[in-house]
């Protein structure tokens, strides 16, 4: 059976917006980049809480948070801080795949109305599989004028441009 050529569609030759296509060889250890800032509103915080069924009094009960809570006001759920912080650095690379997260820490509270941004640092890379290496980046989420509120490390597999150059270093099973 013969294979058919991929059917061409209108606009296939245009570059894709908001995507990257870097490969394992392009990953530079030590490189840092900062995201844009984003303010967290009450409406989106409550929507997030409802979507993930997190109705803890610290994130959902203004009276409790103000009168009995340790911080005197409502928090943004840690899962939301993580999601937004990582999302601010989403790169949409067509050659990478998430392998997982390590060392997730919520260092300081984030409140409704705080503005956050993220700094990504390329930490390390190593050959892992026949067709993909493993890269590790850190995400530091800061609020307002630079107070660190969250830290995590993201592991990603990323395709090699030239797999044959890495085969002698691939992890043996």
Image (tube, rainbow, N blue to C red):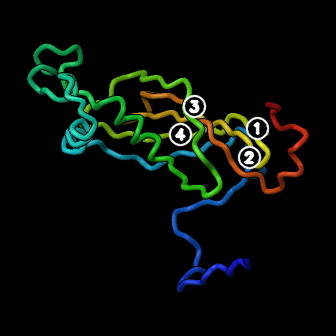
| Residue 137: mark | none
User: Which residue: 34% across, 36% down?
Assistant: 80
Name the residue beneath numbered marker 1: 128
How many residues crowd mark 3 within 10 Å: few (<14), some (14–19), many (20+)?
many
Question: Could you say which is closer to the camera, residue 167 or residue 17?
Answer: 167
What residue is shown with label 4? 119
Name the mark on residue 132: 2
Mark 2 or mark 3, which is nearer to you? 2
Front one among 98 and 70: 98
Up-down relation of residue 103 to residue 29 (above or below): above
Chain-order first, disc 1 or disc 3: 1
Is label 1 in contact with label 2 (beta carbons under 8 Å)? yes
- Mark closer to the chain start, 4 or 2: 4
The numbered dot on residue 153 is 3
Assign the C terminus to one quadrant of the image: top right
114 or 123, which is in the foreground?
Answer: 123
Mark with earlier residue (4, 3): 4
The mark closer to the camera, 4 or 1, is: 1
């Amino acid at each position: 059976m013969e294979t058919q050529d991929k059917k061409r569609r209108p606009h296939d030759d245009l570059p894709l917006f908001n995507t990257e296509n870097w490969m394992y060889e392009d990953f530079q250890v030590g490189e840092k980049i900062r995201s844009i800032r984003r303010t967290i509103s009450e409406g989106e915080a409550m929507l997030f809480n409802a979507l993930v069924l997190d109705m803890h009094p610290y994130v959902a009960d203004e009276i409790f948070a103000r009168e009995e809570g340790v911080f005197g006001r409502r928090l943004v759920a840690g899962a939301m801080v993580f999601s937004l912080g990582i999302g601010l650095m989403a790169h949409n690379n067509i050659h990478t795949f998430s392998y997982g997260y390590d060392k997730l820490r919520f260092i300081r509270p984030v409140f409704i109305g705080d503005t956050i941004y993220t700094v990504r640092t390329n930490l390390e890379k190593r050959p892992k599989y026949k067709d993909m290496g493993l890269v590790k980046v850190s995400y530091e989420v800061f609020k307002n004028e630079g107070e660190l509120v969250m830290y995590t490390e993201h592991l990603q597999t990323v395709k090699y441009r030239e797999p044959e150059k890495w085969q002698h270093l691939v992890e043996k099973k």
